[in-house]
Image (cartoon, helix red, strand yellow):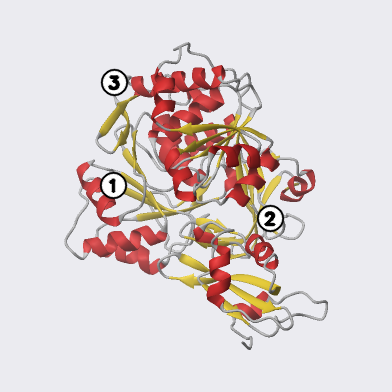
Amino acid sequence: MEINAKSIGQIYKNRYNPDKTAILYKEEAITYRELDDHAIAYANYFKSLGVKPSDKFMLDAGNSPEFFYTYLGVVRNAAVIVPVNPMLTLDELTYIAENSDAKYMLIQEGVMAKHGFTTEVLEQTLGVKLIILNEDFLEAVSKAPREDFDLVKDPSEISTFLYTSGTTGKPKAAMLSHSNLLENSAQTDLGLGMRSDDITMCVLPMFHVFAFTLCILMPVFGGGTSAIVENFLPKEVIADLISKDVTVFMGVPAMYIVLIEAGKKNITFPKLRMATSGGAALPVEVYRQARDNINLTILEGYGLTEASPGVAFNPPSIQKPGSIGLPLPESVVRIGDENDEALPVGEVGELLLRGPNIMQGYYKLPEATAETLQNGWLHTGDLAKIDEDGYIYIVDRKKDMIIVSGLNVYPREVEEVLYTHPKVKEAAVIGEEDLLRGETVVAYIVLKEGETAHHKEILRWLKTKLAVYKIPRRIEIIDNLPKNASGKILKRLLKENKVES
């Protein structure tokens, strides 16, 4: 795989026709020449603000071309970009700002208004220089110099912090290098058989690595077009799929349920040649309905933040329902035993990964890094098996992570917030299957002696502490949490509903 770019900021260089459309957004068609001009302008503007190599720069914005321009402009200054979910609360943003040592933060004006944030509160609480994405900002950028530069000296330099977490402790910053993301863009481009005339829809949230690598970086790496959509509003998305001649759709299972329903109303997508699914396990029934009802073959895949993220996909030629497919080019997969030794075909063990897309480690967490990157392998925490044809099947998760509509929710994070409620004595959070969202969050709590509370009271309080997708859909107030002899909470019994409320 030929990669001419030294940094993410140059990913589209030497691979495109300058007059070809790189980005479609609403009614706007942005050419590669215009994309380059924006990237250079943003890079110069950030440089004028004092952004320097290795500075940490938070980005809090929704899907938009400006998100992409900001990303390109920051990394051309050899700074580290830290994309965050626009749904995060002030408490959650504060943790990330402090943990990442962020010096700057660009936030969309609409995100500020939605949360009721003020400039003074954000700057004082987060300790960053705040840049507001509004009309004044856009005007200032338009006047920036057009000196073409890239301060990245080595592709192995860190370009991106993406916050992820296990089942213990606070979220961790996975450190991805320029080469990690460049290589994964090339891996997925080749593995999925992308074409330069493809138009790939990006409706997944761009702060998430699934969307950013596969829906933005990969298309422009291959000289294709990315059609950016702000939110998954079914009517609008269906209209865009048809009117913008989208050929590739990247989504999570819940989105395909919506497209299948549209197919029942005789709506067709004549240009759509390929669809991929990730973020959560694709139910076999959804795969079959998409194939039979709307003539759409969904290629299920697998990835994780620490792998930039693409690891495996069902190839366009042969799919196996229920499988995550074959490893992408240059990705090495092993099903390991407790000593990381390879297990035979069909046996279940931990899914171990190796390749150019694997992260450099977790920021300021050497012990967590050493635990995850052992013996030259990335330990995913997922249990899997491989069949005789090399197709991989995820059997279960060793981690307790909950995936809500493709977004990761970590029980420990929600539990820690619940424990700060003055009436809560103990808390345990689990995921339950949900047809639309994949999973939903459920919390079991024990109140302190003498306290009374209604679940609605707890929910109202949580809404000020957590992003919407992390808030439990159901709260059960019970007398005792099931525990073993050593006092460990037995979440297995909670999942089996073996509790008394």
Q: Could you tell which of marks 2 and 3 lies nearer the N-terminus?
A: 3
Query: What amino acid type should be assigned to the residue bearing mark 3?
Result: Asp
Residue 333 shows in this picture: no
* In this picture, residue 233 sits left or right of residue 426: left
Q: Residue at x 45, y 35 (%)?
A: 67
The residue where tag 2 is placed is 342
| Viewer-nearest residue: 493 or 74 | 74
| Gap in angstroms between the C-alphas marked 1 and 3 | 24 Å
Check whether the beta carbons of the residues at disc 1 and disc 2 lie within 8 A of each other.
no
The furthest residue to the bottom: 500
Judge left or right: residue 294 versus residue 132: left
Q: CA distance from mark 2 to mark 3?
A: 50 Å
Secondary structure beneath label 1: loop
Residue on which disc 3 sits: 19
Q: Position of residue 199 (x, y in %)?
A: 30, 38
Q: Amino acid at mark 1?
A: Arg
Q: Determine which residue is flagged by label 1.
A: 273
Label 1 vs label 2: CA separation? 36 Å
Query: How far across and how far down the image is residue 475, in percent?
Result: 56, 75
Q: Residues within 10 Å of mark 1 (few under 14, many from 20)?
A: some
**x, y percent for residue 447:** 69, 78
User: Which residue is found at the position 28% from the left and 20% from the top?
Assistant: 19
Query: Which residue type does callout 2 highlight?
Result: Ala
